[in-house]
């Protein structure tokens, strides 16, 4: 398997660090906002909200790309629990800053970014390989999966 | 973030390790938000340290107790520290079960023992055991302009909109840290610029009862999602319980954290003041047609009219709502095939006991419960298939959470359903 470093990314977008660090993995993308309490099962890292396009899918071990947080103030607590259960996402990329998403990212302690120069929802598809370098403010994207 | 000398000292341990951990978390949180500094707060409402046993089990190596949960989870600390009594004025919001009627709610002895132990820790740490989603009905009422750190969507929207207090929708970790550090990031609703109206809702059909206020709230959240609406028009008879129901409905259907009502709420003396010079977004109309559609939407998950559970008290009932329920049921009885559970806080229940209303409800076969609700505890009477509510918020949540049918109507219709076992509500 070729190392990520051997093949340049197809695309790099830039943004603001929310939580620092570096991670890489497959993307899970949704254009729908995500509820924490009542919307996520922390034992499985799975979206459970009725009618959500990701219902039944797990974000464990993936870079979660989503517009932002909605719903109950229990958002951070539910995502925090996924860290305990080993079902946390690898990193977060989101557009709309709220107290729910910010606190959730902080207690998840995963590389997280916002305020992008190009909308990640327009450039990242589920299954693309994504490397977040939050300290450098960059997101590298390899289309179609692991390079 | 820009820190004062006192805040730097707190971060560096001058007030002990727990306060240092709290500051560390709040600084990380503030930087994540992009906040420039902190505001001082002496009014915090959260769920400090309370957890089910399985969360404690994750921290077995740290002792698996309240101290471990508060350090590791609430303060997101890498080490377990002694947690001192909190210094900020703080209260505990709703929890998992009734302190007396937990058996009726189907809770185990073990779960109750864990609940009781957590509660003793909460009070030993100087936190008021209000155990309610309506702290403003139980002894914690902010003042205009006061910076708060509150959880619970219905309490947040009431604090911002009706009282003119200032709070973001905080989470468990930020409220627990704020109880120790008396600081919260200066961002969002703490700033003037963030509190301006964004969309207009023109109310053209009369909204003049708690039922109508609830439906208008549900419409509002559906229309504006999490933006700040400005409402104008045929809104009548503002009162605390009407605002309570309006805000809770708007927060659950859309995520509204603040609203303005022109000439009614404190930061909206006029329409112009409510928008504050900000660009006006969309204009929505709430007329007869929209009212009908909202009623049908709320009642789209009911099919069977054989009601076996009536739940009142979302958000927690006020003393006058309990009095009203008692007046409506006095001389009647809850039907043999039905249960009536009414939820409130301990403080309000004490008033209802002293006023005789609790006894009237008991005599009729209703149960007056505190600390929780059926959505938070996920506890309904055994065998519940069809429920009825006078709360748009609860109609939104409980059928989805519990997989049951639900009806929404007036308090009178709900009491009638409890006494007959039949849903006969309709829109007049």
Image (tube, coloured by chain):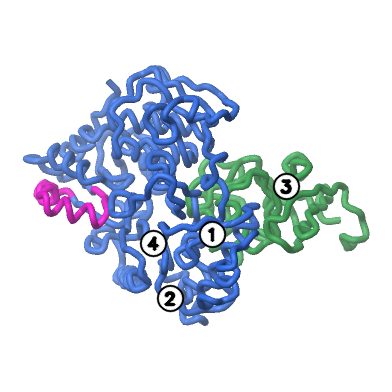
Chain colours: A green, B blue
Q: Are marks 4 and 3 on the same chain?
A: no
To which chain does the residue with label 4 belong?
B
Look at the numbered discs 4 and 1 and tell me whether their residues touch, using CB distance below 8 Å.
no
The correct choice, above or below, for B296 with respect to B172 in the image is above
Q: Nearer the viewer, residue A53 or B179?
A: B179
Real-space Cα distance between discs 3 and 1? 21 Å
Residue found 33% across the figure and 45% down from its top:
B315
Q: Nearer the viewer, residue A51 or A36?
A: A36
Residue B121 % position (x, y)? 36, 73
Real-space Cα distance between discs 2 and 4? 14 Å
Residue B25 % position (x, y)? 58, 65
Real-space Cα distance between discs 4 and 3? 43 Å
Farthest-out residue, front: B5
Q: Which residue is mark 1?
A: A42
In magenta stretch: residue B362: yes
The answer to which of marks 2 and 4 sits earlier in the sequence is 2
Look at the numbered discs 3 and 2 and tell me whether their residues touch, using CB distance below 8 Å.
no
The label shown at residue B84 is 2
Q: Which residue is mark 4?
A: B90
Helix, strand or loop: magenta stretch = helix
Residue B9 % position (x, y)? 58, 72
Real-space Cα distance between discs 1 and 2? 30 Å
Look at the numbered discs 1 and 2 and tell me whether their residues touch, using CB distance below 8 Å.
no
The label shown at residue A126 is 3
Residue found 11% across the figure and 49% down from its top:
B355
The span picked out in magenta is B342-366
Please indicate whether residue A131 sits to the left or right of residue B388 in the image: right
Residue A131 % position (x, y)? 79, 57
When asked about the image quadrant of residue B89, the answer is bottom left
């Amino acid at each position: 398997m070729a190392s990520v470093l051997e093949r340049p990314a197809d695309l790099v977008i830039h943004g603001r660090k929310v939580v620092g660090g570096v991670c890489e993995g497959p993307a899970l993308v949704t254009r729908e906002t995500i509820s924490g309490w009542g919307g996520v099962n922390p034992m499985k890292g799975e979206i459970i909200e009725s009618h959500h396009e990701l219902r039944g899918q797990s974000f464990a071990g993936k870079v979660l790309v989503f517009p932002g947080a909605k719903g109950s103030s229990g958002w951070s607590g539910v995502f925090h629990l996924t860290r305990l259960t080993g079902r946390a996402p690898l990193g977060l990329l989101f557009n709309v800053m709220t107290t729910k998403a910010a606190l959730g990212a902080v207690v998840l302690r995963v590389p997280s970014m916002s305020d992008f120069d190009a909308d990640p929802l327009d450039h990242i598809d589920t299954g693309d390989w994504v490397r977040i370098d939050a300290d450098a403010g960059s997101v590298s994207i390899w289309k179609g999966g692991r390079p | 973030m820009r820190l004062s000398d006192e805040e730097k000292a707190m971060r560096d341990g001058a007030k002990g390790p727990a306060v240092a951990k709290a500051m560390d978390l709040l600084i990380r949180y503030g930087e994540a938000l992009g906040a420039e500094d902190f505001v001082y707060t002496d009014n915090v409402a959260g769920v400090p340290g309370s957890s089910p046993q399985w969360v404690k089990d994750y921290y077995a190596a740290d002792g698996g107790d309240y101290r471990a949960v508060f350090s590791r989870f609430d303060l997101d600390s890498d080490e377990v520290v002694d947690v001192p009594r909190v210094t900020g004025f703080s209260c505990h919001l709703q929890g998992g079960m009734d302190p007396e009627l937990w058996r009726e709610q189907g809770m185990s002895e073990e779960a109750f023992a864990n609940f009781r132990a957590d509660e003793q820790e909460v009070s030993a740490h100087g936190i008021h055991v209000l155990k309610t989603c309506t702290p403003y009905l139980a002894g914690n009422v902010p003042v205009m302009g006061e910076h708060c750190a509150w959880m619970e969507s219905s309490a947040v929207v009431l604090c911002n909109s009706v009282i003119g207090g200032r709070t973001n929708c905080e989470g468990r970790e930020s409220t627990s840290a704020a109880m120790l550090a008396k600081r919260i990031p200066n961002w969002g609703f703490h700033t003037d610029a963030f509190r301006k109206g964004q969309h207009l809702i023109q109310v053209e059909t009369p909204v003049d009862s708690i039922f109508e206020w609830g439906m208008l709230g549900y419409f509002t959240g559906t229309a504006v999602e999490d933006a700040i609406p400005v409402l104008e028009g045929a809104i009548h008879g503002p009162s605390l319980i009407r605002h309570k129901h309006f805000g809770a409905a708007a927060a659950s259907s859309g995520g509204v954290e603040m609203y303005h009502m022109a000439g009614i709420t404190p930061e909206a003396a006029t329409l112009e003041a409510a928008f504050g010079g900000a660009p006006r977004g969309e204009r929505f109309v709430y007329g007869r047609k929209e009212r009908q559609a909202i009623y049908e939407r709320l009642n789209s998950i009911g099919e069977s009219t054989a009601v076996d559970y009536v739940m009142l008290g979302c958000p927690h009932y006020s003393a006058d709502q309990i009095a009203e329920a008692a007046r409506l049921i006095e001389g009647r009885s809850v039907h043999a095939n039905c249960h009536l559970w009414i939820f409130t806080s301990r403080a309000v229940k004490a008033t209802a006991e002293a006023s005789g209303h609790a006894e009237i409800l008991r005599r009729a076969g209703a149960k007056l419960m505190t600390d929780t609700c059926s959505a938070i505890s996920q506890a309904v009477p055994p065998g519940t298939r069809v429920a009825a509510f006078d709360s748009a918020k609860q109609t939104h949540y409980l059928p989805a959470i519990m997989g049951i049918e639900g009806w929404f109507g007036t308090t009178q219709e709900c009491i009638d359903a409890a006494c007959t076992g039949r849903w006969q509500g309709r829109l007049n």
